[in-house]
Image (spheres, rainbow, N blue to C red):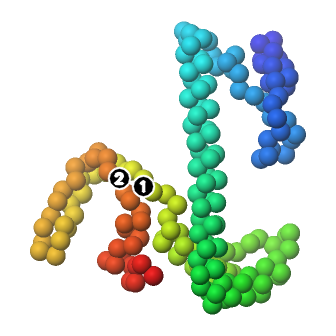
């Protein structure tokens, strides 16, 4: 009986249409959806707010990084007409051969893929990321044989642009 009430609750509590859903309505997340075992109303409200904030951040982050990457790709192609012409020619040659039943193979557009990958390297949409070392790491610090050990479980920040634009990692890194 309780299961029927929950199904009825979900069916009757709809919000605006979700662009990612095949149906025209989606269920809303309500305080009553969280189990009430030893939780206060304030705790439930805080959980809903936290989850909503996290989901919003993930959704916006996905859109922003994609939009930034596409914008930089178009910018780079506009600054290099020869590259733009080559990418355009490749796309015009390959894409018309696809139909709804053909599985897209990104390897069919190697130059276009290279343009996107190079744009992501030079114009990284993510400012930094963090990692935690899973084991002790010993690294060379310079050409004189200097070493440093990073202990297991150390949290460190990685700045992808610094890595991507370092001549030690990429020939002509800043081109």
Q: Closer to the camera, 24 or 167?
A: 167
Check the image and report above or below for 88 versus 54: below
Answer whether residue 22 is visible to the viewer in this image.
yes
Q: Position of residue 59 (x, y in %)?
A: 64, 46
Residue at the farthest front position: 79
Q: Closer to the camera, 100 or 73?
A: 73
- The answer to whether the residue labelled 1 contacts the one labelled 2, judged by CB atoms less than 8 Å apart, is yes
Q: Residue at x 15, y 64 (%)?
A: 147
Q: Position of residue 83 (x, y in %)?
A: 62, 86
Q: Element under label 2?
A: strand
Q: Which residue is mark 2?
A: 157
Q: Which residue is mark 1?
A: 128
Q: Between disc 1 and disc 2, whose residue precedes?
A: 1
The local crowd at label 2, few if under 14, some if 14 to 19, many if 20 or more residues have their Cα within 10 Å, is few
Residue 75, label in figure:
none
Q: Residue at x 78, y 79 (%)?
A: 95
Image quarter (top left, top right, bottom left or bottom right) of the N terminus: top right
Check the image and report above or below for 32 versus 124: above
Residue 93 occupies which quadrant of the picture? bottom right
Residue 90 occupies which quadrant of the picture? bottom right
Q: Residue at x 63, y 16 (%)?
A: 35
Q: Position of residue 62 (x, y in %)?
A: 61, 52
Q: Residue at x 42, y 78 (%)?
A: 174
CA separation in Å, label 1 and label 2: 7 Å
Image quarter (top left, top right, bottom left or bottom right) of the C terminus: bottom left
Q: Element under label 1?
A: loop
């Amino acid at each position: 009986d309780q299961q029927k009430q929950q199904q009825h609750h979900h069916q009757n509590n709809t919000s605006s249409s979700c662009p990612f859903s095949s149906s025209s309505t989606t269920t809303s997340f309500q305080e009553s959806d969280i189990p009430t075992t030893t939780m206060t109303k304030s705790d439930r409200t805080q959980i809903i707010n936290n989850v909503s904030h996290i989901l919003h951040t993930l959704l916006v982050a996905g859109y922003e990084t994609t939009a930034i990457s596409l914008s930089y790709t178009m910018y780079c192609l506009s600054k290099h007409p020869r590259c733009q012409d080559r990418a355009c020619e490749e796309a015009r040659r390959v894409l018309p051969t696809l139909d709804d039943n053909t599985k897209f193979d990104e390897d069919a557009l190697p130059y276009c893929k290279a343009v996107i990958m190079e744009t992501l390297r030079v114009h990284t949409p993510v400012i930094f990321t963090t990692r935690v070392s899973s084991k002790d790491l010993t690294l060379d610090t310079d050409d004189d044989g200097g070493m440093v050990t990073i202990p297991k479980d150390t949290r460190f920040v990685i700045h992808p642009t610094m890595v991507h634009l370092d001549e030690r990692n990429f020939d002509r890194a800043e081109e």
